[in-house]
Image: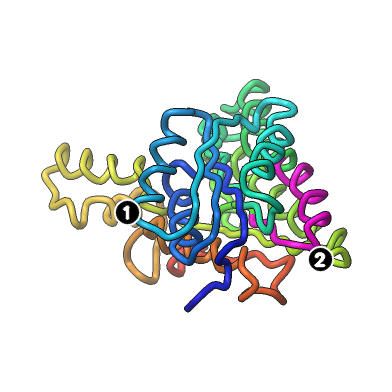
Amino acid sequence: MDLGVRGRSFVVFGGTRGIGLAAAHALAADGASVAVVGRDAARASDAAATIGELDDGRVIGLAGDLRQAGEADRVLAEVQGELGNLHGVAVTTGLGVRGQRSLLEATDDDWEDTFSDVLLATARACRAAVPALVDAGGGAIVTTAAYSIRAPKAFQAPYGALKASVATLTKNIAKSFGHQGVRANCVCPGATETDVLAALRVAYARDRGWPEEEALERVMADEWGMHVALGRPGRPAEVGDVIAFLLSERAGYVTGALVNVDGGTDF
């Protein structure tokens, strides 16, 4: 399906790897101009070059860290200078590594780090994006929460709480700025085989003597308690395609939605 994004400009924060990179690929493949943004300048440049070789759209790579005040505004101003008016912004940052702790284990520093990485970073990106999208006559924002916001896990109290806040923030944006042509939706991925899970698959297979093609699936079900209807983790492109769709006019009447992309993961 043609997304209808040819010639339009988009920003993907966290677009240098994993789900964000896949979303940027999907947009550029249909002729969009895309800025991929990550904390590492060399990685951003390499990601842009790779996408540019494979797809039709113009792609630029920029360094930016949403944990730092003012970075979202600076990056979006640079993107508009390079690519023109914005039509959409995706925020796929916020791994929340220090948030993978229980309530009793997580320190104040863990909570503050997770708040900055997951919620404040997203809020900064959205706060910078909304005026730019309004000025352009409207557009779309897509944020990233997690399937676990509806299935809290004891070992990720800060992460789950702050990802749930991202979902609430997104609905607030949809309600507050819909009359100005801004749509906002939140994608909730399940376990997705990005670099981290791909490396775990190899490690589990090696350490336990299991076939690689089933090692991660066995751990997900037996040890993580994740029972997935499709029987496997997701692929980055399967989430990235949904993000690209939600950014496009094909999703023109979709706003304020929480979209599960989790393969049917049980609570």
Q: Position of residue 127 (x, y in %)?
A: 79, 43
| Residue 118 seen | yes
Residue 56 occupies quadrant? bottom left
Question: 101 or 132: which is nearer to us?
Answer: 132
User: Which residue is rendered at x = 40% and y = 55% of the image?
Assistant: 236
From this view, report whether residue 144 is shown above or below residue 140: above
Query: Residue 149 at x, y = what percent?
Result: 61, 54
Q: Residue 47, which numbered label? A: none
Residue 135 colored magenta? yes
Instruction: Provide the residue span drawn in magenta.
Output: 125-142
Q: Which class describes the residues within 10 Å of circle 2: few (<14), some (14-19), or many (20+)? A: some
Q: Which residue lies at the image location 64% right of the left edge and 47% below the top edge?
A: 163
Amino acid carrying mark 2 in the image:
Gly
Please state which of residues 39 and 225 is positioned toward the viewer in this rendering. 39
The answer to whether one can see residue 266 in this image is no
Q: Residue at x 69, y 53 (%)?
A: 86
Mark number displayed over residue 181: 2
**In this rendering, would 23 be left or right of 75?**
left
| Mark number displayed over residue 222 | 1
